Image (cartoon, rainbow, N blue to C red):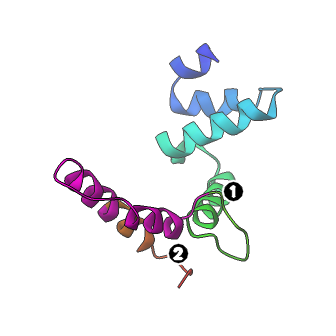
């Protein structure tokens, strides 16, 4: 795994496929997807993009562990005061930006 972290992005993509443990491969793919998605094959990148949209928006009847909608509902239940107002506003803005992704079909 140390070699993976010190390698270039294209080398990481090749190394990731050599991991015997599927959990390490998934972790490596996630790191690649968020760090440099162009290092992944187009097919794998598209699958990971679709999985991300499904997870964020709980599409197609697949219930994700935490969706944007659930996170916004949780945020509405926070007692906002001067100590946390800025953080709550920042998080709400970020979640609203995520929910405006063109792939969003949850409404």
Q: Sort mark 2 into few (<14), some (14-19) or many (20+) by Cα contacts within 10 Å.
A: few
Q: Sort mark 1 into few (<14), some (14-19) or many (20+) by Cα contacts within 10 Å.
A: few
Residue 35 x/y as whole percent: 47, 40
Residue at 77% over, 27% down: 18
Please tell me whether mark 1 sits on a helix, a strand or a loop: helix
Q: Nearer the viewer, residue 92 or 94?
A: 92
Quadrant in the picture for residue 66: bottom right
Residue 30 x/y as whole percent: 60, 42
Q: Which residue is mark 1?
A: 43
Q: Is residue 23 left or right of residue 49?
A: right
Q: Nearer the viewer, residue 80 or 18?
A: 80
Q: Which residue is mark 2?
A: 103
Residue 20 x/y as whole percent: 83, 26
Q: Which residues are magenta?
A: 66-93
| In magenta stretch: residue 67 | yes
Q: Nearer the viewer, residue 68 or 47?
A: 68
Q: Earlier in the sequence, mark 1 or mark 2?
A: 1
Query: Does residue 69 sit above or below 106 in this rendering?
Result: above
Q: Which mark is residue 63?
A: none
Query: Does residue 52 sit above or below 62 in this rendering?
Result: above
Q: Is residue 70 left or right of residue 44?
A: left
């Amino acid at each position: 795994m140390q070699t993976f972290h010190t390698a270039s992005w294209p080398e990481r993509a090749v190394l990731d496929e050599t991991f015997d443990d599927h959990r390490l491969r998934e972790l490596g793919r996630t790191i690649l997807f968020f760090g440099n998605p162009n290092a992944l094959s187009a097919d794998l990148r598209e699958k990971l993009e679709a999985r991300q949209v499904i997870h964020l928006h709980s599409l197609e009847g697949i219930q994700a562990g935490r969706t944007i909608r659930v996170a916004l509902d949780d945020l509405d239940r926070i007692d906002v005061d001067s100590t946390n107002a800025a953080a709550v506003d920042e998080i709400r803005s970020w979640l609203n930006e995520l929910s405006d992704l063109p792939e969003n079909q949850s409404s």
